[in-house]
């Protein structure tokens, strides 16, 4: 799929799972970091525990992230890792956005 | 228009970052296959020679140096054909393998110096366990960085065989065990990684 192709934007092809503000932030952060712990994501995205948990669960249900829970120095540690389908979905989302911008650009 | 161009550039930049993080194939499988195959064959030759009553001072003593020269010749040729890694994981694993290779080289040199200085050839018996432990370390890094679970199996195998070769050190059968270990735990995984890289490139 060529993201530079003009006027082929289809709103139905926008991935709703990625499109949420907080979920988009998670995906964008993980697309470069690969893996992050819950506290880091919470701080970088300025989210609350409950809100971030809800959105991470939604991403996990879609198979876009993998969540692992462990203990470090007797404290619980939750790590979130972007999966390959998640990365593909994020790239697909960016392609959709690129098409949206292109379709909004007037032809010269 | 300028704003839209900036947005387009930003999206393209984010896309490039996301693409770069993709789990690309691990490179260097051909090098592992060649190294494991060559040194495994060398160990097998030595085992055959010793089993037929030949002395370690016969032509057998030249098997390791000859296989070393052949490996370095192959290494230079293979490195020229190996593409640059595209993902961070592949880059990290490549560095780990390079570091392990140099460590093996220095370790063998150090043990030879010790054996000559102390006049005790038994020190050379430490080479096989040390090298297999280093392969285990390299596979551990590769398994963790690339998230390929089967490589953890190779890691455990290499560590286990390091202990086994330590147990049989200075016995003729140790060469056979070492040869089988190199074929199964270095050459074979190297072949699989090489095939995966070729499939990904196709």
Image (cartoon, rainbow, N blue to C red):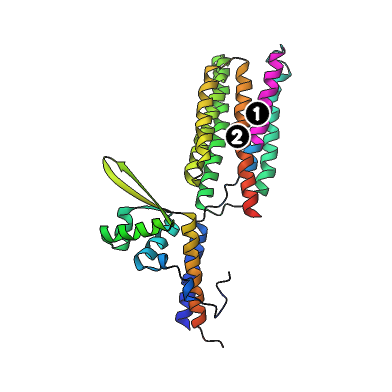
Chain designation of label 1: B
- Taking the spot 60% from the left edge, 19% from the top edge, the residue there is B174
Q: CA distance from mark 2 to mark 1?
A: 9 Å
- Taking the spot 40% from the left edge, 68% from the top edge, the residue there is A19
Residues packed near mark 1 inside 10 Å, few (<14), some (14 to 19) or many (20 plus): many
Which residue carries the number 1 mark?
B40
Which residue carries the number 2 mark?
B186
What secondary structure is the magenta-colored segment mainly?
helix
Relative image position of residue B135 (x, y in whole percent):
54, 33
Boundaries of the magenta span: B34-52
Relative image position of residue B95 (x, y in whole percent):
53, 44
- Taking the spot 39% from the left edge, 65% from the top edge, the residue there is A24
Q: Secondary structure at mark 1?
A: helix
Of residues B155 and B74, the one drawn nearer to the viewer in this rendering: B155
**Above-or-below relation of B160 to B196:** above
Relative image position of residue A94 (x, y in whole percent):
48, 68
**Above-or-below relation of B38 to B58:** below
């Amino acid at each position: 799929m060529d993201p530079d192709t003009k006027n082929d934007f289809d709103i139905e092809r926008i991935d709703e799972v990625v499109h949420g503000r907080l979920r988009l932030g998670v995906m964008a952060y993980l697309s470069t970091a690969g893996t992050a712990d819950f506290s880091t994501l919470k701080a970088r995205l300025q989210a609350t525990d409950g809100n971030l948990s809800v959105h991470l669960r939604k991403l996990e249900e879609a198979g876009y992230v993998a969540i692992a829970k462990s203990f470090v120095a007797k404290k619980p540690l939750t790590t979130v890792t972007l999966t390959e389908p998640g990365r593909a979905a994020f790239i697909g989302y960016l392609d959709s956005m690129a098409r949206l911008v292109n379709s909004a650009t007037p032809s010269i | 228009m300028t704003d839209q161009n900036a947005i387009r550039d930003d999206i393209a930049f984010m896309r490039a970052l996301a693409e770069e993080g993709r789990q690309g194939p691990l490179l260097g499988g051909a090098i592992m296959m060649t190294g494991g195959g060559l040194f495994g064959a060398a160990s097998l030759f030595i085992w055959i020679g010793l089993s037929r009553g030949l002395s370690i001072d016969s032509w057998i003593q030249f098997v390791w140096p000859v296989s070393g020269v052949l490996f370095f010749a192959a290494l230079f040729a293979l490195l020229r054909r190996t593409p640059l890694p595209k993902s961070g994981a592949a880059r990290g694993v490549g560095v780990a393998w390079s570091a392990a290779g140099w460590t093996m080289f220095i370790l063998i040199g150090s043990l030879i110096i010790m054996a000559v200085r102390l006049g005790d050839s038994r020190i050379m018996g430490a080479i096989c366990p040390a090298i297999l432990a280093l392969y285990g370390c390299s596979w551990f890094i590769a398994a963790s960085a690339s998230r390929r679970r089967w490589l953890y199996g190779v890691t455990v195998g290499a560590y286990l065989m390091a202990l086994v070769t330590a147990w049989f050190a200075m016995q003729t059968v140790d060469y056979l065990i070492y040869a089988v270990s190199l074929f199964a735990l270095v050459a074979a995984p190297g072949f699989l990684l090489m095939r995966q890289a070729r499939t990904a490139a196709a």
